[in-house]
Image: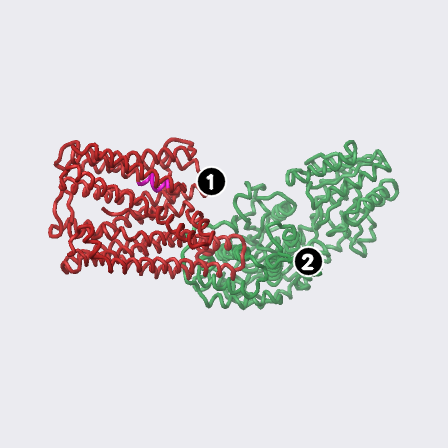
Amino acid sequence: MLPLIGFWGLGLDMAGIGFEIRKILERDSYWSVIRAYGYAGMVSGGPWVLSILSIMMIGVLDVTLGVEQREVNAFQICVTYLMAASLIWTGGAQLMFTRFVADRTYADDKAEVLPNLFGVLIVVMGGGFAWAAPFIFWFFEGPFVQQLLLLCNFVVLSGMWIGLIFLSGMKAYRRIVWTLAKGYLLGIGVGLAAAEWKLNGLLLGVLTGHSYLLFSFLHHIVREYPGSALLKFDFLDRNRSFYSLFLVGTLYYLAVWVDKLIFWFIPYTSEAVIGPLRASIIYDLPIFLAYLFILPGMAVFLVTMEADFAEQHERFYRAVREGDTLMHIEHRRDRMVYAARQGIYEIFKVQGLTVVLCLLWGRDLLHAVGISPLYIHLFYIDVVAVSVQVLLMAILNVLFYLDARREVLIITACFFITNLLFTFATLQLGAEAFGYGFAVSVTVSAFLGLFILSRKFNRLEYETFMLQN
Amino acid sequence: MKTVSETAAGARVAGPGAGFDAGPVIEPVQESVADIALLLEGTYPYVRGGVSSWVHQIITALPEIRFAVVFIGSEPSMYGPAQYQFPGNVTHVETHYLLRQDRHIKPHARKGNRRAFAQMDSLHTHLREGGEIPSNEMMDAFTRLGSPDGITQEDFLYSKASWEYITQQYRQRCTEPSFVDYFWAVRAMHAPLFVLANIAAGLPPVRAVHAISTGYAGLLGAMIRLRRAIPFVLTEHGIYTKERKIDLAQATWLHDHNDDVCNTLHDEMGYIRGLWIRFYEQIGRMAYGQASPIVSLYEGNRQRQIADGAAAERTRVITNGINLERYRTALERRPETVPPILGLVGRVVPIKDIKTFIRALRILVNRRPDIQGWIVGPEDEDPLYVTECKELATSLGLNENVKFLGFQNVLDILPQLGLMVLTSISEALPLVVLEAFASGLPCLATDVGSCRELIEGRGGEDSALGSAGSVVSIADPEVTAEAALALLNDATRWHDAQRAGLARVARYYDDKLMFSSYRSLYMEALGSGSSGPSGSSGSSEFPRSPGSSSRGCDAAAHRVLGAGA
């Protein structure tokens, strides 16, 4: 089960969560610092931790209810693939649409947002249906109901990601976490109740949970946003949307999943589980566990980026617009660079500490969860890799603030290509090298990101004043 | 009169001051599209007004000369369709807009040419010091403008070298806090220069250029003269630099950051306002430096040109004129008695100071209740001001005596008036004064522009003709009212003024005189044109000293002005 980090952070940018965090930090006590980080952790980590935990819960509870482990495994693999497919399918639309909404809000055009949201949902869900249906019906040999459940899950999930990212932009994060909790509880409940239908029951549970989430999100959105029309497709207009962002979103999710996909479909490292879906026992478990440990880094990322950097960024652009002296503008730019640098250092430190702790207690942890200690090396390298991924996300986040779309595209493309190439390379090099493909690729991309970011900062005033349209 | 082009090639150039008849025939050097290219900034043919009408009259009255019309405007949206129909001798028309980017260039980072910017620095230093700029330096600068190994427009707008130059200048010189204001002022100032360089490069071959103002038109003329070594004539109606200074003084988009904490005795003008003023002064100087002759409408303006940097020996005065025949009917329809009606013929805008006129009328009506004041002119330019004037008239209880007539045919109005009044705070050579004189109407005007010269004469024989009315100070309703009463109540004085006006306008301000002055001016310019070895455009030959041929012309001009004595 793999987490859904991605543009959740970007949605939060829009939301002004930094403002809330800053308010907490203003009280300037240790308790307020803890509260701030806890809040950030909950908001940044909440959604995907909840989803992972609930999937696990279903599995555990069902086994205790007597469902075969094999069925539960098949279920977990299905959900993983559903998540991966829906994320890759909607990643581009998520990013592009988020930017579209931000532009409309800035231009005071809020009435345009809701009809376009429905347009996006139709495109994403309808389009998803269009290609997933033939694929599922062709490749899955199971009963029709099962195929149908898979298809519905995929379509609903695709819609739900859009709703989730949109809602995050509405500053409704507490509501999101609360709704997610309710939704997953519902899913668990239904899954348990339908346990006798085995895999189909579990799938039905997830479908119910995610459907509840989708409609609950939409309910809240429609209530909050005035709309002039029902359906609009303005977001497809080249003049109003940035297709480069679509590419970035898709490439990013592809990059994150491609090494897993490779391991799943190389016969040597994987096995068939259900239908065409395969899993890689040696690869999946360690990385699943490793992803749980990015929570500290994510919390720090949110606090430093959204609270500090965002504020300095805002001050810089205000200085430019409102007629400050050049010297003062440069001073503000330096403060912004400092905030970015500090943020990256903080993440580095916190994740570094986390890595150290994992190294220290890794064996005990694996033992407690019941995973063979043979996985320990893969687990170590995976923890390092995901920690660097948090750094990469932070760098991309800063670049998004600076609206450096071309630069972000270069970095995500690099991430995707290197992950692809290096993972294949590790397969040639043997089991000792497994996991290093992903780790090296994310590190290379992070370094590239740092280099590009540094260059961008150096030229910032020049680009801000001279190179505008 | 034979046209220039008809007369056989090979005839020699006649001497300067050849007189009114067609004499000098000039051997065309190249396939020129027109003889004179008129460089017009914001006037003919898209904007109706005094200058545009003047240009139209000149073109119409000199059919033997082929004209090219080069219009320079700010943005296309500011202008409607052409307001004048071109006469047959307009052989080429171009329209350009300084603020519009012709190609939509996407900003791309580029390095730019550092050396070119360093050279630009020395030119800027010269400009700052305000002295005479050597022609070769200017020529180098203009050659660099727009050329690939100099500074292209993209370089200026988007290159790193440009950014570094601008920030360096800001750090060294700008006392104004706002960088973004400085940055955009620099852009706004220089971007049109690239457009001008393109125009100068793309203009088809002509034999001479004639700019009708300094400013960007004058600068364009200077650029063309430097590139092609053809004659460059400059005529100024108003003084462009002065008008821009007034505009800038009233501009609300310029912030003067006056420090409230440290009190200085004088008002510190904002740095950016100063930049703009210096900019206009300098491009004016560039035009004066390259133009010959430099024509103004009256002596006061000529002195101002000299003060602004024009070489005195190249300046001359050619006054405007009117078609006397047209106003004869108005003269004939004049009643026996003097109507107690004061007329102000002009646009209802603040520069005409209608409010002083209305206040003066209040004083007049107190003394003579039969007096009326008519305000005759279009009211669409400044509706707010129009409302203010009408409210002022009402509040002073003048609804019976003051009438706003809007735009009228001046020939109908003139016979009904008893006195033509001008209360403007700024004028050049107001045609309404001449029209009033030609229709037998004395004039009361403020002492602005050439009004004193028109009413009291320019000295010598001119002043001996007598006073055609009265001259008062601006914005003084009491004095204005007194002067008006003095004329309306004294029939002898009124008739003397009428006689003086008629005589003056007939002797000095007949438009036939103006047309012949310009005819001979053009002939002279075309005659002294580049018949040198490298007559091709774009040559970097030094311009020939223009001083010699103008002296003879001055004599001719004086003869024109003194004709009929």
Chain letter of disc 1 in the image? A
The residue nearer to you, when weighing B366 against B242, is: B366
Mark in the foreground, 1 or 2: 1
Q: Which chain is green?
A: B
Q: CA distance from mark 1 to mark 2?
A: 41 Å
Q: Which chain is red?
A: A
What kind of colouring is applied to the model shown?
Answer: by chain
Q: Quadrant of residue A87?
A: top left
Residue B6: say if magenta: no
- Looking at the image, residue A50 lies above or below residue A363: above
Mark 1 secondary-structure assignment: loop
Badge 1: residue crowd in 10 Å (few <14, some 14–19, many ≥20): few
Q: Main secondary structure of the magenta part?
A: helix
Residue A452 vs residue B148, the one in the foreground: A452
SS at mark 2? loop
Q: Amino acid at mark 2?
A: Asp
The spot of residue A139 in percent (x, y) is: 14, 39
Mark 2 crowd level (few <14, some 14–19, many ≥20, 10 Å Cα):
few
* A393 relative to A135, above or below: below
**Region of the chain picked out in magenta, as a range:** A161-167
Percent position (x, y) of residue A394?
A: 35, 54
In the rendered image, which residue does mark 2 sit on? B267
Q: Is residue B332 visible?
A: no
The one nearer the camera, B339 or A37, is A37
**Residue A165 belongs to magenta span:** yes
Q: Chain under label 2?
A: B
Which residue lies under the disc numbered 1? A108
